[in-house]
Image (cartoon, rainbow, N blue to C red):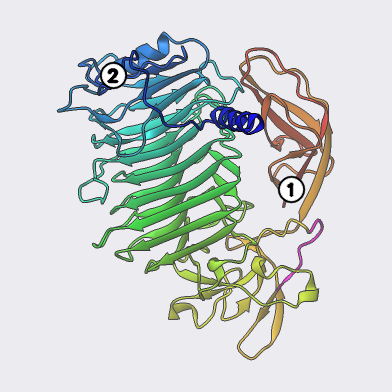
Amino acid sequence: MKNILSALLYLYMAATAYGQSVTASPPSKQKVVRTTRTAPLVNASPNIRYVDPTSTTDLVDQVNTLFANCSHTCEVHIPGGNYGPGFTTPVGTDALHPTIILSKSTQRLVGDGQRITNIIDTNALPFIDAHVAPFNLNPGIVISGFSINCTNTAAVCITAGDATGFRIRDIEMIGPGGQTNDASSGTSQAIVLANKLGWSERWKIDDIVIGGFHTNLHFEKPDGGTDSFGYGQAEQITSNIGCGDHGVQVDSGANVYNIIKFEYQFNYGCKGVTTGTEVFTIGGFFAGQNFHVTGENAGNNYTFAHVLKGGVFFFDGDYNVFGLPNTGLVVTDATQPADGPVPFYIGTQVGTIFKSAGIPLLSNYDGSGESFRVTPVEVPTNSREQAARMGYLTSTTSGKGAVYDAFEGGSRRCHFVRNQFQTEAALTPVWCVDAAGNTTQTSIKLGPTTVISSFVKYSVAVTPAAVPASTCRDQVFTAPGMTSSDSITQFTSSVPFGEVSVTGYPNPDKAGQLIVHYCNSTTAPYTPPAATYNFMAIR
């Protein structure tokens, strides 16, 4: 019996230790009080502060004050409820403080979730401005867990930048057009990313619902900072796009590179005839891997991707759109820039991008205004070529005949290679096949006349000098054989670049020299490490 009692006592203690207990009535002298919470929860942690949803003080002022009074890592929590015009707690009514300012990498603004914490902002100025000042490399700034209705037709709902590893997640964003785009969206923007002091890298945007804005996601050209928006991820972004609106816009001068993943679903709801509706508008550099884009439409008057002059769109992934545009899926500028890069590249992940014949349509490739079908070609498995990187262009109108060679003209089908960087000497000639089966050779051209002669790989050893704090400096290094007219690709380095961002270009005044542009956004001088920079020169 003693052993049995001991065993039962042991089991009771073990269950209690793991959070389990026997249900029992409280002792008669213990007072049990159950009340409904009428005041905001006060957390024991000094680094978690709560907005008072019953206060008549402006929500923006409450949040800014709570952050100002909280040192080090700090989370300001907005409890579930309704905030804004018509509710107890107003939003942005103080003209001096209409915007929530997040200026430290240690700050987090958190609600209870979409459609639980609901906010209405009527201002044109941003509801949230999240830029780390002074800029540093510490990961931080988190914005999550609420629905925000930015009703002003000139609204910039959330703007961010100059932050490493910032997060925007679990947010519903409704613009002046309404979630289903029933009204005009004006010039409103949902999320605008811009660099004022440094760069924005290792960012992540996930579980975002957007509707009723003129532009959903906008990467702006530098505003005093660098052009870098590298190593980012976008997961589960869903959006509604109205007449003349834009999904993703990348300005000329913005560099969105080495994207880890980009998941984007859109519904195009415009049933009338309109121009300017674009899912992707690319004026800068937008490149990465794991692109997964799906969508459906209520009309065919839209463009999947508009690549502006000087823009580059490396789409490495797949897309599946129900209801294709009646013009080009991919529209380039009037002509390709001389000696410039190919503006649109279909990646090597063979998915739904190649499962439908004639996807994508590529418009204005040669400046004719026509649309051409890009179709993959079959190549022998022992040819060491990748079928997904090969294709030919076919005219969609009778004006050019049944088929059309975009590089030379005429009624021929020409195989071409996009991104043939593995060739260091002269390019492999393009083979064209006419209707009779006769084959001829031609060259790859940029525009109507300029012929690419070669891709040359360079490895340049550099020993950089110190770069002052908060300063950009050009440094010149020897690169034998480089010409002033070469176009070069982005560098890879034998060692990390360290605390600087790096770009480069041939010296326009002297052949054989490489100019490297270093930007140091830290508060102290920094000497980049000696290294070997590898890149390709196109001529």
Indicate which label's residue lies in the foreground, 2 or 1. 2
Q: Which residues are magenta?
A: 423-430
Quadrant in the rendering for residue 407: bottom right
Q: Residues within 10 Å of mark 2 (few under 14, many from 20)?
A: few
**Height in image: 517 above or below 295?**
above
* 109 up-or-down from 503: above or below: above
Q: Most prominent secondary structure in the magenta stretch?
A: loop
In the shown orientation, is residue 152 left or right of residue 1?
A: left
Q: Left or right of 186: which side holds 480?
A: right
Q: Quadrant of residue 33?
A: top left
Figure disc tally: 2
Q: In 3D space, how far apart are the residues under numbered discs 2 and 1 (Cα atoms)?
A: 76 Å
Residue for point 67% across, 12% down: 524
Residue 480 x/y as whole percent: 84, 40
**Which one is in front, 445 or 315?**
315
Q: Where residue 115 sits in the image (x, y, percent)?
A: 30, 39
- Which residue type does callout 2 highlight? Val
Instruction: Point out which mark residue 80 bears.
Output: none
* Quarter placement of the N terminus: top right
Q: Residue at position x 41%, y 25% from top?
A: 109
Can you say whether 333 is above or below 123 in the image? Answer: below
16 on left or right of 92: right
Which amino acid, mark 1?
Ala
- Residue 425 in magenta? yes
Q: Which residue is under mark 2?
A: 33
What residue did someone put label 1 on? 537
| Disc 2 secondary structure class | loop
